[in-house]
Structure formats: structure tokens, C-alpha cells
Amino acid sequence: MKAKEIIAVMEKHFPLSLQEEWDKCGLQIGQIETEVSKIMIALNADLQTIDEAIRNQCQMLITHHPFLLDPIVNIDQDDFMGAFIFKAIEHHIVVYSSHTALDNVAMNEWLMEALGIHDIERGEDGITRIATLNQPMTMDDFLDHVQTTYHLKHFQYAGHADMVRKVAICGGSGADFMSQFYGKADAYLTGDTKYRHAKNAVDHHMLLIDIHHHAENIMVRKLKELLEKEVNVEIIEGSSPDYYHYR
């Protein structure tokens, strides 16, 4: 199967027209006529990931976070960006990223569904999601549920909710979307929160949970399941370890 056919399936589900203005979704490196018999899906486009794709003899690497998000000043094989490009080209690997095109369609649906919530509605911005828990939970029970669901070794939270009924979510850097849910959601889940967001949660009697960017790793399994229904190639999951260490 050619890379362009796999890309067509990706863009049928996650049109590039839906990406944010600042984003760089789509083909990152490679030739769309490349014959692909094995794909690796990973959260991040980094040297560890491209090396893993090479070891597994993949012809295509699909990542969530784009390789080309940062501008390329030069292509030096001794730095990260140059080394990544050289390795992808040398081993004939097509690199494709979905990022906010996928975020705006599916990421927050998947994060909600993982919590066992299905009556999902879009937030005012179109990216976030809000839903009602099947059964209300105490704050402590909900915190345990979130930690188990997203495999979080450690996480931080701010604010308080006696009982959690309504939950809003935005995977990745979504803390600035929180204000639309004041008085509407008991808990808001996102990543990259700052001190001011914690204060806002306290001030507005909301539970704010920072689930880190790495919670988005759920897309690896979910995208694999989606593509396996439509493309006739082997698909493997990249390891995508968390960049942070905790102590």
C-alpha cells in the first residue's frame, strides 16, 4: 500500500483544514509514493522514535506531535533536527503527523471515553469536551479514577469539588480554555497548567487536574484500532515514554 493511500485515510478522518493556524500537520518527511508494509504510531517525533521505527523496519511513522513544529534554521546532522531528517531519508521512512487536526476531531472524545463517559458535548471553542459521569464520584474517588485511567505516576491538582458530576477536558495545553466551564463543570482536566490556573480553579470552586501532555498517548492505541479497519498493512505501537522523570 502506498503512503499516499494511508495519508488519504488519515485525512478523511482528520482533515488538515481542521488544524490550528499555528500548527504543521500532515506530511513531514518522505515520498508519498513509498510502498508501505509496516507503520509505527507514536506520540512524539524524536530520535528515540525514529530509531525505534528503523529497528522495527517500518516504512512509515505516524506521530501526534509534529516534527516540523519548530522552524528549521539549518540541517546539521549533528543536531536533533538534522539527525532526524537524515535518518528518515536514509531509511526511506515517511513521517506524518496529525496533531491538532486529530485533536479537533477525536482526542478529547477518546480521553472522555477512557473515563467511561459517553454523553459527550463540545465546548464553546469546539476543541474541548464536557460530559456527565455515569455515577457521581467523590473528589478522592475521581482523582484515583483519573490516575488509573491515564496511567499517571504523579499528577497535580488544585481547587476542590465535594462531588464530581460534570467533567470537562482538553488534552495537551488547554488550561486557557478552562474559564468557559466555570459554574458548568465540577472538574477540568488538561495539561501545562500554571499557577494562575490553579488560583482560578480555587476562586471558581472547580477541581483542576493536570494530566500532563503524556495522557495524549491514548491516541497511539486508538489510531491503531481505527487504521487497522481501513489499511492492509501491519501497524505497531511506538513506546513513546514520558519526557518527565518524577521523584
Image (spheres, rainbow, N blue to C red):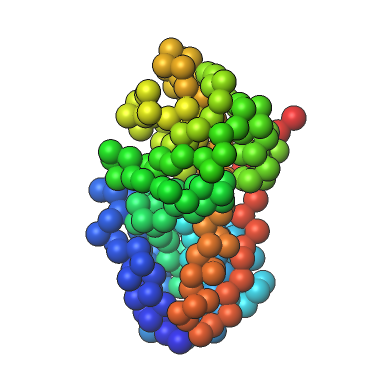
211 and 60: which one is in front? 211
**Residue 126 position within the rendered picture, expressed as x and y whole percent measured from the top left:** 30, 45
- Name the image quarter holding the C terminus: top right
> Which residue reaches farthest top?
203
Where 195 sits versus 62, above or below?
above
- Picture residue at 47% right of the left edge, 56% below the top: 64
Q: Is 202 left or right of 9, judged from the image as shown?
A: right
Which image quarter holds the N terminus?
Answer: bottom left
Residue found at x 38% / y 81%: 5
Going 47% across and 27% down the picture, which residue do you hit? 186
| Residue 192 in sight here | no
Left or right, 82 with reference to 139: left
Asked if one can make out residue 148 in the rendered structure from this viewpoint, the answer is yes
Q: Is residue 99 left or right of residue 44?
A: left
Residue that appears at 58% across and 80% down: 234
Q: With respect to residue 182, does 63 lie above or below?
A: below
Query: Camera-side residue: 119 or 87?
Result: 119
When the figure is inspected, residue 5 is found, relative to residue 209, above or below; the finding is below
- Report which quarter residue 196 is drawn in: top left
Residue 144 horizontal/vertical position (percent): 67, 35
Question: Residue 165: image x %, image y %?
Answer: 50, 33
